[in-house]
Amino acid sequence: MLVFKLRYSTPSRPFKSFLRTFTMSAKEYTEAWLAGPQSTQFYTRTYLPPAPTPAKAVLVAVHGFAEHVGRYTHFHPLVAKKGVAVFAFDQRGFGLTALDTEGKKSRGSSWGKTCWAHQMEDLNWAVNHAKETFKDTPIFLLGHSMGGGEALGFATQEDKSPHKATVNSLSGVIATSPLITQTNPAPKLMKWIGGKASLLAPYTLIPAAVKAEELSHDKDFNDAYLKDPLIKQSGTLKGLSDMLSNSEALLRSSYRRWPKDLPLFIVHGTDDKVTSHRSSEAFHKTIDAVSKKLTLIEGGFHELQNEPDGVKERLVDEIIQFVEGHVSSKSKQVPSASTEPQISAPAATEEASTPEVPKANL
């Protein structure tokens, strides 16, 4: 088990073509509308390493609540440049998948209209699409925030799940600032009321504002978030209730189902005001995995991929190191050298101990 602490010292307009290749600073990506579960049309992007370099692995990238893949236009090319392809899609109920005005989105695919069960089906579809597109290439599931909670949830499904074979095919899971619990959870009563209301009016929209100044230390990125036409400060009762309850279940019970031979890498900022880095520490501690790694970015905010001063570049390097360390077959994996947390030299100001599992605030 490895734990590291590191000291932290404008979206594009929708494209009109069904499939088009773009060149951005010698980096390419393709966009496509692909049919997924429930006949939903998903807006997707694929980033490839610079030709003629073949992809050493593929990341299936799952974005966070209320956002979309266009917010990663600056980040995913950094990963692809290192030889790792990225397949990303606007999740059900978000981004162009929900808000496209050019007639490609599916009927009924309105803003926030999603649920945990459908999200698990969507991840299963996305991973299998990547497997079919990149034959015999290791596939890693990468999720951020809400997407990070989904990635952890996908890996901890019950054995009887129809998606278990897909889980077993993964070479690893990466979660950045995952939603396990909120840094400042909503009151227990409010969540109980919301859960009950979601049964009566599941797709009723309610406010779900995000404080942009808490996303990163980069004011330009934060301002762009508020001006982004593909972001709405709301969610559905069902979508929000499922997101919170299933994420909190990760620490309550789901962690017991983590596949022992599935490598995990979690990275979180210690000043994240949106999702709890303490819960990431607890999840990392409690799962029984042969290979697991936790990196804490001291002083980092929620969107590490948007942090200045070299943080996002360090995040890319950490992801690539993890991928390169697990591209071989699972049979060749060996346990970590130590079962105790290890703290890197820069983190002299904090205790190395891992907290006890926090109680789920349901």
Image (cartoon, rainbow, N blue to C red):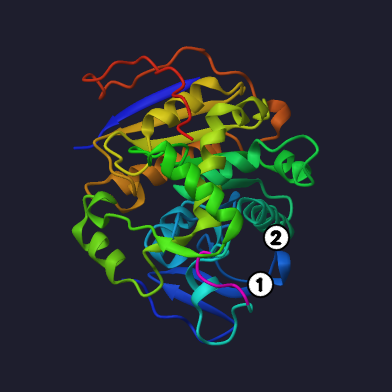
- In reply to whether residue 28 is colored magenta, the answer given is no
- The image shows residue 32, relative to residue 171, as above or below, that is below
| Res 260 → quadrant | top right
Of labels 1 and 2, earlier in sequence is 1
Q: Which residues are magenta?
A: 108-112
Q: Secondary structure at mark 1?
A: strand
Tag in front: 1 or 2? 1
Residue pictured at 48% horizontal, 28% vertical: 293
Query: Marks 1 and 2: CB-CB under 8 Å?
Result: yes
Residue pictured at 44% horizontal, 31% vertical: 280
User: Which residue type carries mark 2?
Assistant: His
Q: Nearer the viewer, residue 288 or 99?
A: 99
Q: Is residue 170 left or right of residue 19?
A: right
Label 1, label 2: how far apart the Cα atoms are: 10 Å
* Residue 255 rendering spot, x and y as whole percentages: 60, 28
* Residue 96 rendering spot, x and y as whole percentages: 50, 74
Residue pictured at 27% horizontal, 54% vertical: 211
Q: Main secondary structure of the magenta part?
A: loop
Local packing at callout 2 (Cα closer than 10 Å; few below 14, some 14-19, many 20+) is some
Q: Nearer the viewer, residue 247 or 76?
A: 247
| Residue holding disc 1 | 34
Local packing at callout 1 (Cα closer than 10 Å; few below 14, some 14-19, many 20+) is some
* Residue 34 rendering spot, x and y as whole percentages: 66, 72
| Residue holding disc 2 | 129
User: Which residue type carries mark 1?
Assistant: Leu
| Res 281 → quadrant | top left
| Res 140 → quadrant | top right
Residue pictured at 60% horizontal, 32% vertical: 263
Q: Nearer the viewer, residue 246 or 275?
A: 246
